Image (cartoon, rainbow, N blue to C red):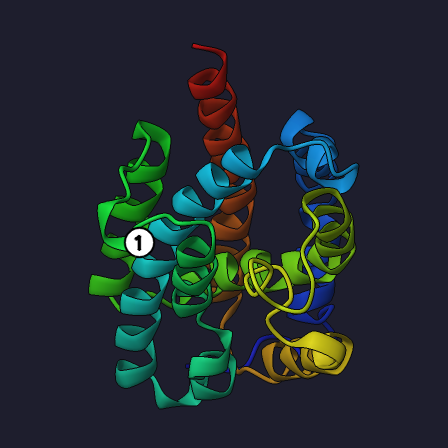
Amino acid sequence: MTTSDSTAVSLPDMLKAETAERHHIAERHPIQQQLLKGQLSREQFADMLEQMLVVHRAMRVALTALRNGCPAFAPLLHDDFFQDIRLEQDLRFFDRDPNAVVALPETQKIAEHIELLGEAEDEALLGWQYVLEGSNNGNMYIARAVGQSLGLTGHDGLRFLTPHGEMQRPKWQQFRADLAGLQLTDDERGGVLIQACQAFDAITCMMDGLQRFWDN
């Protein structure tokens, strides 16, 4: 890999700017608004966690393959960022079997896409990691609303939403710094951006699917 033009905007700043509209659309999704207002039922919240587990199981496999193939990416892909185990713990708290999760079609499509990126050891997968890890910033506020509405105390049921606890801000700042420090070509940076945009679009689509599931 060769370094991009040193005068170029940093990769995390580029991602933030170029995905801003998609980020806004995702935040305004009815399910996200219901989460933030503590309006989802216990069963609906567990349903959402199930779909996120499918995504994050695929991410663990794909990111591990990328890390093994490209050691330079290891700081961005250490096990502390993997969310599948936390999701399994949350689901068991809500009396759901993590091994009996049925993916919605939209979720399955996401998992298959992530798997292909992992098999190719494609650095563009970092775009998905940027979106999913960045979502933890807003999830801190969602956790408070969900905890209050469902009567949850401590971490039980909320581990996915609060993976880093009080260290969320420092963890995110370090993630951004590590991402900015990568030596990527302009084409590679463009690939990361494309995947970040696709991640926002796909997750919004998944939430649409979840809403249709509840409406039927």
In the displayed structure image, the side of residue 203 where residue 53 appears, left or right: left
Q: Nearer the viewer, residue 10 or 54?
A: 54
Neighbor class of circle 1 (other Cα within 10 Å; few <14, some 14-19, many 20+) is: some
Q: Residue at x 29, y 58 (%)?
A: 117
List the single residue furthest toward the left: 119
**Where residue 13 sits: x, y (%)?**
74, 64
Quadrant containing the C terminus in the rendered view: top left
Q: How many marks?
A: 1
Q: Nearer the viewer, residue 76 or 191?
A: 76
In the displayed structure image, the side of residue 9 where residue 115 appears, left or right: left
Q: Nearer the viewer, residue 162 or 179?
A: 162
Quadrant assignment, res 137: bottom right
Q: Residue at x 74, y 33 (%)?
A: 33
**Where residue 17 sits: x, y (%)?**
75, 52
Q: Residue at x 34, y 81 (%)?
A: 67
Quadrant assignment, res 25: top right
Q: Is residue 82 above or below residue 149?
A: below
In the displayed structure image, the side of residue 129 where residue 64 appears, left or right: left
Q: Is residue 43 above or below residue 93?
A: above
**Where residue 82 sits: x, y (%)?**
44, 71
Q: Amino acid at mark 1?
A: Pro
Q: Nearer the viewer, residue 188 or 108?
A: 108
**Where residue 88 sits: x, y (%)?**
38, 61
Q: Is residue 89 above or below residue 48?
A: below
Label 1 element class: helix
Location of mark 1 (residue): 98
Quadrant assignment, res 62: bottom left
Q: Is residue 177 above or below residue 163?
A: below
Quadrant containing the N terminus in the rendered view: bottom left
